[in-house]
Image (cartoon, grey):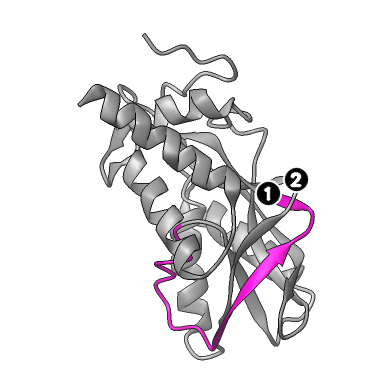
Amino acid sequence: MTEFPFNPPPTSFVQWTDAQRAANLEATMAAAPDPSRLWVFAAGSLIWDPRFEPLEARTAFLEDYQRAFCFWTVRARGSFERPGLGLALEPGGTCAGVVFEIPQEGRADILDALWRREMSGGVYVPTWMPARTDAGPVSALGFVSNRAHRNYAGILPRDQSARIIANALGSMGTCHEYVALLADALDRHGLEDPDTQELHRLVQHYLAAES
């Protein structure tokens, strides 16, 4: 039986209304340091599936945030019976990823789709943060963990995270597939993340042990 040493998985869904999403989007855009050029920082699935054609894409680095599987997912890559762990940015450390510049044409539709994808239940706090790129610094929008959310799991030990991810299954598939896609995307972009690579190795170890 799996034990959950930090915050346990939720027992119900959190679903934001259209009005909540719209208000959050409006407040986030009002705080944009440079509204003429909007960048979004991709730490997870946005890297390989941004779902819009960016004006420009660059590898980028955050100095004050790290990639972490720190919230419960009980819908997309997990369920109430087999909960998974979702990815967010956590304060502290560093993070290598990709920044995409959102074009002016169709911007409203792109942002609406992004908010429907990332902010369906409010597990993130959209945050403007400095990102370092080879072509110079940019201010990018990142999705930071909402520690007040009922789905927030906390920073679990890597071994515990790997066991949970190896067992998780949701409407969009397995959680371990997500980790494999992330590891592959980071490798294709030449981005080093030893923690993610080690997590992927451990997940594969537990999958092999169960087969």
The secondary element bearing badge 2 is classed as strand
* 204 in relation to 163, above or below: below
Q: Is residue 193 magenta?
A: no
Q: x, y (%) of residue 59?
A: 61, 73
Residue drawn 52% across and 52% down?
Answer: 119
Question: Which residue position holds label 2?
Answer: 91
The residue carrying pointer 2 sits among few (fewer than 14), some (14 to 19) or many (20 or more) residues within 10 Å by Cα, namely some
> Given the image, on which type of amino acid does mark 2 rest?
Pro
Camera-nearest residue between 193 and 32: 193
Question: Disc 1 marks which amino acid?
Answer: Gln
Write down the residue under mark 1.
Answer: 66
Please name the residue shown 27% across and 47% down the image: 172
Residue at the image position 57 percent from the left and 14 percent from the top: 5
Which quadrant of the figure has residue 58?
Answer: bottom right
Give yes or no for contact between labels 1 and 2 (Cβ–Cβ under 8 Å): yes
Q: Is residue 36 above or below residue 148?
A: below
Quadrant where the C terminus is found in the figure: top left
Nearer to us of marks 1 and 2 is 1
Q: Toward which corner of the image does residue 39 lie, by quadrant?
A: bottom right
The residue segment tinted magenta is 45-65
Whether the magenta-drawn stretch holds residue 53 is answered as yes
- Name the spot of residue 194 as percent of width and height, x first: 59, 48
Label 1, label 2: how many angstroms apart (C-alpha)?
6 Å
Q: Is residue 123 visible in the rendered structure shown here? A: no
Q: Residue furthest left?
A: 211
Q: Main secondary structure of the magenta part?
A: loop
Few, some or many residues within 10 Å of mark 1 (<14, 14–19, 20+): some
The kind of secondary structure element at disc 1 is strand
Q: Nearer the viewer, residue 2 or 190?
A: 190
